Image: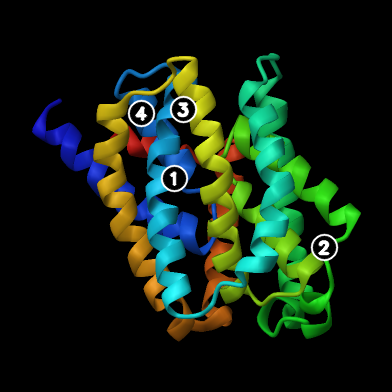
Amino acid sequence: MTTFEVIALIVSGVFVGFINTLAGGGTIISLSLFMFMGLPADIANGTNRIAVILQNVTSVATFRQQKLLDTRKALWLALPTVIGSIIGAQLSVQIDEATFRKAIAVVMLMMIFFIVTKPDKWLKGQVKLQEMKVSPLQMMIFFAIGIYGGFVQVGVGYFLLAGIVLGAGYDLVRANAIKVFIVLLYTIFALAIFIINDKVNWQYGLVHSIGNIIGAFVASRYAISWGAGFIRWFIIVIIFITSADLFGIIDIRGMVNF
């Protein structure tokens, strides 16, 4: 591995860790860089999980330190997500990638509508929903999110935030704390599947993780001081950028490839 590759992996990792902690979609940078550096798509997908785990270990520890993580509710929501992620990681069926990418973009843009038109649900939280037990419907939704996360990972943070904010009633700051906890748990199982199938490049994954840890720490450390309002607009901007890439309007991979 050259010095340039090490620097590229670490610097990009800082951005990925920051974006993934506060919103989601940063994984598209990781996958693009890994493939540019010569990894096949399936190995890039598996290798990325190393950084995802380490960035979320950092975020969870920081959120817990600030007493922002509702561990009990997070565990209940994580259970179906973990089960779904195992199934998703084992999926081998071929899909139309172009159609799939556009479908993700449409869902992301729909999220912007809810964030803009119903800001109170995203900024203030709903105590009554927080106190309610996890319903069978929520279990099914998070199971489906888990399948997607285990299979692809890109943009899973948006779906988790929507489920946690709109379904469980948390504001964006506390929802992010639960999100990173869930991602940490299910990614451990998903990574195991990729390891068993020899789809992980440890050298690239561990070096990339250095930057991810830094970015995740900064984002989770200052999330409470920035507040839900800042995170709300940060998510809107990132969704627009990610959706533009998914629709082919811009080319993030080309930007990463210099």
Determine which of the numbered discs, if any, sits on residue 134 in the image: 2
Sequence-first tag of 1 and 2: 1
Label 1: state its secondary structure: helix
Q: Is residue 218 left or right of residue 244?
A: left
Residue 163 in the image: state x and y as whole percent. 75, 59
The residue indicated by pointer 4 is 34
Residue 132 position, x and y percent, is 84, 73
CB atoms at circles 1 and 4 under 8 Å apart?
Answer: no
What's the CA distance linking mark 1 and mark 2?
Answer: 26 Å
Task: Point out residue 54 in the picture as x, y percentages from the top left corner.
Answer: 37, 48
> Is 201 in front, or is 99?
201
Q: Is residue 196 above or below residue 211?
A: above
Disc 4 marks a residue whose amino acid type is: Phe
Label 3 or label 4, whichever comes before in sequence order: 4
Crowding near pointer 3: few (<14 within 10 Å), some, many (20+)?
Answer: many
Q: Amino acid at mark 2?
A: Val
Q: Which residue is mark 1?
A: 52
Residue denoted by label 3 = 46
Q: Give the structural element (helix, strand or loop) at label 3.
A: helix
Question: From where the camera sits, is residue 253 visible?
Answer: no
Counting residues from the start of the chain, the first of labels 1 and 4 encountered is 4
Cβ atoms under marks 4 and 2 closer than 8 Å: no
Would you identify the image quadrant in which residue 128 lies? bottom right
Marks 3 and 2, Cα distance to the nearest angstrom? 30 Å
Relative vertical location of residue 20 with respect to residue 37 in this rendering, above or below: below
> Residues at badges 3 and 2 in contact (C-beta under 8 Å)?
no
Mark 3: which amino acid? Gly
**Which badge, 3 or 2, is on the more N-terminal residue?**
3
Residue type at mark 1? Val
